[in-house]
Amino acid sequence: MTQRSTVAIVRTPMPPDEEDVDRMVREAVRLSGGLDGIVSAGDTIIIKPNLLAPASPGQGATTDWRICKSLANQVREKGAKAIIAEASAIGADTEESIKASGYDVLRAQGYEVLDLKTCKTVKVPIPKGTVLSELSLPEIVMQANAIINVPKMKTHDQVLATLAIKNMKGILPDTLKKKFHTTFGVFRAVAELNTVVKPALSVIDGIIAQEGLGPLFGTPVEMGLVIAGRDPVAVDTITGLVMGLEPSKIETTAHAAELGLGTMDVDMIDVVGLPVAQVQRRFQLASEALENDLRFPPGFELLFNEMACTGCRNGVLSTLRDLEIEGRMDILRDMRIVAGKMDAPPPASDKRTLFVGVCTAAFKDLGEYVQGCPPNNVDIISAITGTSDHEFFARTTE
Ligand code: SF4
């Protein structure tokens, strides 16, 4: 018989202070079964936030440090050691992310905050893998007694929403993050990764969530929520419903359910604390934001494929957002931007075509090309506008 899962939903009035956050997190942990059986005296526990890029806490892109602090304190109260650990997205400096999102405050207060990009890795077999057979993963994560996963509640331009299952991709070194997109197929690979680093508890930060152009450039949404549970698939399922999404369309989570990592069956999930209906809000999807918020001129095409990873996606989306803000979208008329590894070139076209990132290098002679992995935003802007980044912003702000 399939086991039932419990997911706790707790809300705080906005804006919460540190005490409010601590109270809310403790309540969510208690309602979802507490730390007994997860944390014992003498253990080392990894707390894994989402610090994908340098972003201020108000943007809703990175995990609120106050949640990690509360969890670290609860771990310490059990006589165990807490290590907050993360590796930012490809090309992003984790130390910069740590500073921008306020985690240097935690360091100053004596909490251990680690950049996993600098850590030794060990080879780990993936017995249930179909696209993965072995991965090099941070030794410190593999040796930990348990992982507490602390993702953000936010939409994602590729996976619909990035929640508990997707958040574990953050432990990978850059080389593997790339391979997940370019070689293995990111949705399945992320789910298979979770079979060897399955979090014992997932606590989703929905205090300031993010909708639209997530995972980085979306719009902050004040939800005042924390959603927690031991079953990461059930946590994603309930959080998806809170965001007004169809959980089965969150592909990483659907693959994880298929791999037996938890249940997506809402009849098998006990929601405690607040009911979904009381906190539900329909989130704008990244695809809707692209259509509605960025006013593309006629003939513009954005050709991302599944192989395009966060580095290229973020670079291109931030460039498009800059063009929109500066009122320069017309420069994209009859233009295509192509990113992500591909075996064949895009269909022939008279349009001006910009190939972005080394994954498209094989086709660079078919148009213009921006090198890099990931490429610099500055170089993408220069290629599109034909001016330097400095000249572009100087001219448009005259
Ligand atoms: S070029 Fe872009 S899509 Fe290709 S691996 Fe690098 S960041 Fe990812």
Image (spheres, grey):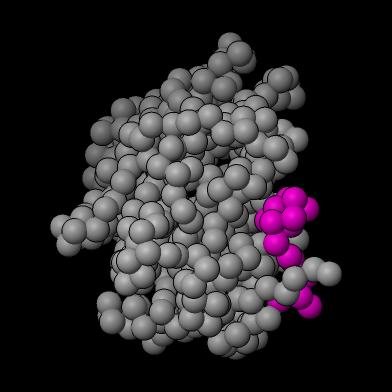
- Specify start and end residues of the magenta stretch as a single range: 253-269
Label total for image: 0
| Outermost residue, front side | 41
Q: Give the side of residue 232 with respect to residue 119, left or right.
A: right
Up-down: is 297 above or below 44? above
Observer-nearest residue: 17 or 392? 17
Magenta region includes residue 10: no
Magenta region includes residue 263: yes
Up-down: is 380 above or below 71? above
Up-down: is 147 above or below 223? above
Residue at (62% x, 15% y) in the render: 363
Q: Give the side of residue 7 with respect to residue 358, left or right.
A: right
Q: Is residue 328 visible?
A: no
Residue at (64% x, 47% y) in the render: 195
Residue at (47% x, 71% y) in the render: 35
Residue at (65% x, 36% y) in the render: 126
Observer-nearest residue: 9 or 120? 120
Give residue 394's position: percent from left, percent from top: 24, 39
Name the quadrant of the C terminus. Answer: top left
Give residue 319's position: percent from left, percent from top: 43, 41
| Outermost residue, left side | 108
Q: Is residue 182 visible?
A: yes
Which image quadrant for residue 395? top left
Give residue 281's position: percent from left, percent from top: 59, 78
Q: Give the side of residue 34 with respect to residue 301, left or right.
A: left
Q: Give the side of residue 33 with respect to residue 385, left or right.
A: right
Which image quadrant for residue 1? bottom right
Give residue 56's position: percent from left, percent from top: 30, 58
| Outermost residue, right side | 1
